Image (cartoon, grey):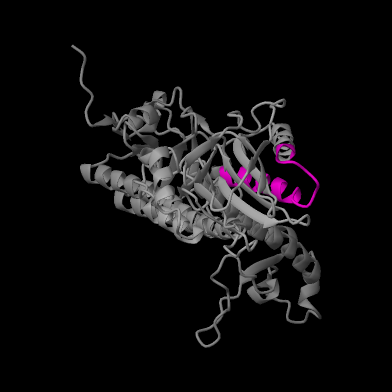
Amino acid sequence: MARKLPAHLKLHDDGGAQVALSTPSSTKFDLAQTMRAFADATGWVPRPIGGTPHHPLDIPHDADAPLPPLRKRMQLVSDYPMDGMLDADDPSTMSGTSEEVAWSLLAQIDGLVQSLKASERVIQAQEAQLATALGVSIRHDEADALAGRLQESLHRASELTGSDAAALYLLDDTTSALKMRSCWGMPTSALTKPPRDLRGSLADLEALMGNAVLLENTSLAPEWQCPESYAAAMCVPIGSPTMPHGTLWLWSDHVRDFSSADIDAAKAAGDKILVDIERSVLADEVLKTRALNRQVESASLVQSSRLPSSQPLHDDYEIGGWTFQGQALGGNFHTWTVNRQRLICAAMGAAATHGAAGALVATSIQTVVETCWNANHKPSQVLRKANDLMWAAEDGDWRSSLCYLQIHPESGSTQLSLAGNIQAFTVGSHGFRPLVGTSTPLALQPDTRFDNQQLYMEAGELLLIASADVVGGIQRGGFSQEALLKLVRDMHDETIETIVDHIARLLPLLDGQSNIDADRSLLLVRRRF
C-alpha cells in the first residue's frame, strides 16, 4: 500500500553532516567593500555626514526625490597617519591621490550606486506589476505600492519564522515556469534571474499540491531543488491546489527545524500576498472601468446629439420618431432633413452588431446618408453607395439594415428604398400596406440590387418605419406587427408627436438579460393635406 504523505514534508539532519554552500560564480556588489577599496587606492576614507540633533542632515525619505549634493552627504578624511607630521606644510599633499581627484572618483561611484538603486526600484515595481499575472497593467503608483506590500509581507513572514531571507515565485501564463517577483533579505538583483522551469522543481510541485515542504538541511536533499544556496528552507503554496499561483520560499543561513507555528505563519503570509495582488488588480480595474464608463458616456452624448429634433420640416407634413439604444452606445439611428431641392429626406439604420461596435457602424452609415442629401440622387443610389463603402471595409462586421426615402411635399410623390430587416408600412383609414425591399443587409455582398419604390401619400396617410426589434415581439423588446399597426391606426387622428411618445411609453421594459442589446428605432411621417 502506498505511503500517505504528511501535511508537510520534513527532511531531518543526521547531526554529522556539514553544510556545504556553493559559492556564487560572480562577485556580488558590496558597497562597504567598495568604499574600503576606494580608501586603499586613494588614501582618503569616505565618511557620511550624520548631522546633529539641532542640525539634522536633510535626506529626503521619498526614493524619487533628488538627493543633496555629494559633499553635503559625505566627507573625505585622509587615511595617512598624522603622528610626527605636525610640521608638514599641507597634510593633504601627503596622500597618494589629491583630494579633488578623490572627490571626482567618489562622485562617479556615487552616481553608479544611485543608478543601481534606481534600477532596483524599477525592477521591484515591474516585478510587482507582473505579479498580477492576469494580463493587465496596473498603474505605476499602484505597482510601487504593491511592491512595498509584498516586501512587507516577506519581511514579516521571515521575522515570524526566524528566517533570514524570503522570496515570492509566481507561475507564468503557461504554468510551466516560476519567476521570482519579490524578495527580502537578499540582493534585489536576484529579481533579474531567469524563470525556473517547473519541471523537476520537486519542492515547488509538492507545495503547489497544497503541502508545506520543510528542508531542515538542504545539503542532504539536493533532489528537492532549493532555488537559493541556504542551509535550511521552507516552501508553502500561494493559492490553492485547484487554482495555484506560485510558491513562497523562506530560507535560513543555519541548519534548523520548523514548528507548526512557523508553517502557519508562512501560509498566512502566502494568503496575504495573494489578497494583496488580487486587491491591486481589482482596484486598478475599478479605476479603469470608471474612466472607460466616462468615455462611453461622452461618446453616447455625441451619438445622441446626431439624432434630429422634432421641429417641423414642412407645413403640410408631420414627422417624428425616436431611437433607444440597448446600451449607452448602440447600432441604430434615425435622421431627416429638407435638402436644397426642397425635398423631405429621411432615413433609418440598424447595425447587426450592438454596443460600441454597432455605434461605429451606425455612425458610418449615417454619415454616408447625410453626405448624399444635397446631391441629385435616388434612394437606391444611397443604399448602393453605403453598401459599397461597408463592403470595402472588409475587417469587422459591417452588416446593417437601411431605409431611405424622399418625399416631394407638393405632390406627395415618395420614393423609398429598403434593405435588411427594417419594416415599412403605409397606414390609412382603410388599412395598411407593407412596403417590400430586399432582405439582404448591407455589406453582405458587393452586387446586391436595390430597387426604388414609388408611392403617393394621400392627405391624412401615415408612413411607418420600424426597426426589427420594435416589431420583433415582446421577447425582443418591442411589439408584434399586428399590435403596432393596430396601435397606430387607433391613434390615427392624434398628432405624430403624441403617437410616437405613446408608443415609446408602451415599449416593454428590457429584462437586463437576453434583451439588453435591443436597439430600437421608429419613424412616422404624415401628410396633413
Along the line of sight, the residue nearer the viewer: 187 or 82: 187
Along the line of sight, the residue nearer the viewer: 285 or 236: 285
Would residue 408 be seen by someone viewing this image from the given angle?
Answer: yes
Where, quadrant-wise, is the N terminus in this rendering?
top left
Residue furthest left in the image? 1
Q: Is residue 104 magenta?
A: no
Question: Could you say which quadrant of the image residue 257 lies in?
Answer: top left
Q: Is residue 378 magenta?
A: yes
Would residue 189 be seen by someone viewing this image from the given angle?
Answer: no
Where, quadrant-wise, is the C terminus in this rendering?
bottom right
- Please report the residue visible at 35 percent of the width from the left and 31 percent of the height from the top: 208
Q: Main secondary structure of the magenta part?
A: helix
Image location (x, y in percent) of residue 244: 37, 34
Image location (x, y in percent) of residue 331: 56, 45
Number of labels in the image equals: 0
Residue furthest top in the image? 1
Image location (x, y in percent) of residue 138: 52, 52
- Please report the residue visible at 34 percent of the width from the left and 32 percent of the height from the top: 207
406 relative to 26, above or below: below
240 relative to 374, above or below: above
Image location (x, y in percent) of residue 85: 73, 77
**Chain part drawn in magenta:** 358-381
Q: Is residue 352 left or right of residue 477?
A: right
Along the line of sight, the residue nearer the viewer: 498 or 317: 317
- Please report the residue visible at 25 percent of the width from the left and 45 percent of the height from the top: 264
